[in-house]
Image (spheres, rainbow, N blue to C red):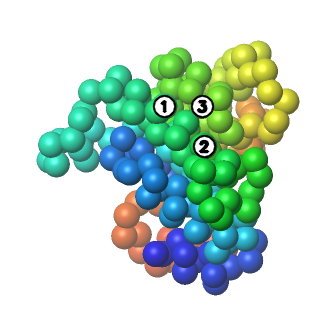
Amino acid sequence: MALSAIALATETLRLGPMVTPMARRRVQKVARETVTLDHLSNGRLTVGVGLGNPADLVPFGEVVDPRERARVLDERLERLDGFWRGEFNPPPIQRPRIPVWVAARWPNRRPIRRAIRWDGVFPIDLSGPEQLAVLAEEINQTRVSEDHFDLIVEVTPGADVRRWEAAGATWVLTSIEPQPPEHVVRGVIEAGP
């Protein structure tokens, strides 16, 4: 609901909720929600997906085995792609589908291979731009598609992003803690992209 309000109140802001743990969600519901948000935003949605944090799953008796969650993620991403490509009406505005960024815990290679099949990777636990440069080179050598591919990193407010950009980052997200003081949020906004 909050993203819908943001979509309607803005015109150029790209929406990218990070990270939707697909193993916890019904794929048909995610498909409907994302298509609706894509329409409300006039095609400004990117969907971030991943396995989810096991600590968030245990209290609810959900599957915590990462291999099983990865299997379910792959299955649901394929299903989601099918819904977006015409199994649901209306289709999303963005073609051939809404972009998907996949979270991947560095240096694990299976999540990186999963992300390469989609539109971007959000590597978790990078120690610095040097590791991003290694990852960027690996992706450039592995990816067969010529389509644009995003490398997303997360930094703290006020961080210098030039080294990340030089290492291959296409998006740098500023991370703020839950319930930050208003002056921190305003500072991030005023710093701009």
Residue, disc 3 = 115
Local crowd size for mark 2, using a 10 Å CA cut-off: few (<14), some (14–19), many (≥20): some
Give the Cα distance between marks 1 and 3. Answer: 10 Å
Instruction: Name the amino acid, label 2.
Output: Asp
Q: Residues within 10 Å of mark 3 (few under 14, many from 20)?
A: many
> Which sits earlier in the primary sequence, circle 1 or circle 3?
1
Q: Is there CB contact under 8 Å for labels 3 and 2?
A: no
Query: Quadrant of the image for the C terminus?
Result: bottom right
Q: Is residue 158 visible?
A: no
Q: To which residue does mark 2 refer?
A: 81
Amino acid at circle 3: Ala
Q: Residue at x 55, y 36 (%)?
A: 78
Task: Answer with the quarter of the image where residue 138 lies.
Answer: top right
156 lies left or right of 44 = left
Image coordinates for residue 121, horizontal then vertical, percent: 61, 36
Between disc 3 and disc 2, the foreground one is: 2
Task: Describe the element under mark 1 as helix, strand or loop.
Answer: helix
Q: Residue at x 52, y 41 (%)?
A: 79
**Place of residue 39 in the rendered image (x, y in percent of width and height, measured from the top left):** 67, 70
Q: Which amino acid type is shown beneath numbered disc 1?
A: Asp
Q: Secondary structure at mark 2?
A: helix
Would residue 76 be found to the left or right of residue 25 on screen?
A: right
Which numbered marker is on residue 74? 1
Q: Secondary structure at mark 3?
A: helix
Q: Using the rendered view, name the quadrant where residue 187 is placed.
A: bottom right
x and y, in percent, of residue 111 in the image: 51, 26
- In the image, which disc is placed on residue 32? none
Q: Is residue 15 left or right of residue 96?
A: left
Number of residues whose C-alpha sits closer than 10 Å to that of mark 1, classed few (under 14), some (14–19) or many (20 or more): some
Do tag 2 and tag 1 residues touch (Cβ < 8 Å)? no
Q: Is residue 160 above or below residue 177?
A: above
**Residue name at image x 46 percent, y 75 percent:** 1
